Amino acid sequence: MGKGDTRWFVHDRFGMFIHWGLYSLPARHEWVRHAERIPNEAYEIYFEMFNPDLFDPKAWAKAAREAGMKYFVITTKHHEGFCLWDTKYTDYKVTNTPVGRDLLREIVDAFRGEGLKVGFYYSLLDWHHPDFTIDRIHPLRDLPPEEIAKLNSTRDMKRYAQYMRDQVTELLTNYGKVDIIWFDFSYPGENGKGRDDWESEKLYELVHRLQPGIIVDNRLDLPGSGDIETPEQYTPDKGMVDAEGKPVVWEGCQTFSGSWGYFRDEMSWKSPRMCIEMLINHVSRGGNLLMNVGPTSRGYIDRRALDRLAAYGEWMKYNSRSIYGCGAAPAEFPVPVDCRYTWNPETKRLYLHCLVWPFKHVHLENLAGKVKYAQLLADGSEIRIREEKTDNLNSHTPQGALTLELPTLLPGQGCEVPVIELVLK
């Protein structure tokens, strides 16, 4: 069923996720309404106070481009129901807050200005909408059953499904070409919601009618409709496949810390080194990485996130050839211990990422006679290669393998994770 054009997507490999909404004010997780059982009236204070006076989408876009990211996905509406654009279908929107402007348009213009492709996240959930029925993950789920039944008796999911289609029509009509739409999420089963509640078939047909070729994620609970698989908050240990064992297009969505929205007190921030390794691991297994930032309620990306984006930028400046246009290496080339391969089928170049820098030698199985040249990608310096066995005390080259003779020390730039580029014959 999938109709999206993923050719650019599997080339670009690296994108920015942006979670930004009213939850940036409490600053204690984007699911704060769920976790703390906050009703609409208590949550209203954040709507009244939302005024990001330091909002600078051009700075966001510049940071993304300099990190090496090629596309972005922004939360136009998260589960809280607040809309970042001037929608006609609710008053619960950014233009009715003190900031008083369509911030989505400014974000789209800024990122397009930096050359990034455009993606819209749209929550299927809406804890603010009067027709969205109270279910097992709704903030009001702990009310007495009779009170829930009374409230739900006036709510109509068919009206809500139409509301979603009306809003998606706005998003896919008023902002030019949109490259990705990221629906989130289905939870069918007892007291949950799935394709019948969302009227997923109608929504999916509408999306492709308005934006032919757009990439749609796999969270509509509509088998066969997703152009991409979307593992979240973990890195698959190998490439993802369909039921028949064929490789699929996939994108891991990840965070710098444990939450998606800005969380002031969170301490579980991944190191810059870990972030770079995550990108390498995704691409080496044939996937994309969508790395998230959660701007503050004043509208800027905080220093912790900027530091990690800068680390990506420093590494990608020298090593992006091992990411763009690359994917999993052919199975005939077993990867050495503590290393990852990526492979560019167009240039026929194999990239060896050394998560641990070996001392003196590394042996590459099944590559004897197949490599024309090897170089350290960071500075373009030659890495000497050896295929024959030696009679001295040097490390012996295994049968059929290629040995790389390595420097003991590495140059400074671009070597947080060193990459060796192998030009195949």
Image (spheres, grey):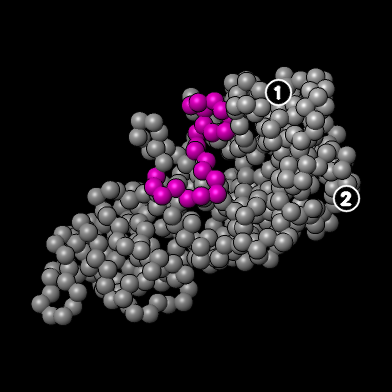
- Relative horizontal placement of residue 270, taking residue 93 as reference (left or right): left
Q: Say if 131 sits above or below 75 in the image.
A: above
Q: Kindly indicate whether the residue at mark 1 contacts the one at mark 2 (C-beta within 8 angstroms).
A: no
In the image, the segment drawn in magenta is: 218-239
- Quarter of the view holding residue 357: bottom left
Residue at coordinates 49% horizontally, 38% vertically from top-left? Answer: 229
Residue marked by disc 2 = 49
Tell me the tag on residue 161: 1
Mark 2 and mark 1 lie on one chain; the one further toward the N terminus is 2
Type of secondary structure dominating the magenta stretch:
loop
The reply to whether the magenta stretch includes residue 234 is yes
Q: Say if 150 sits above or below 82 in the image.
A: above
Kind of residue at disc 1 = Ala
Residue at coordinates 41% horizontally, 68% vertically from top-left? Answer: 418
How many numbered discs? 2
Residue 424 x, y percent position in the rendering: 26, 57
| Cα separation between marks 2 and 1 | 29 Å
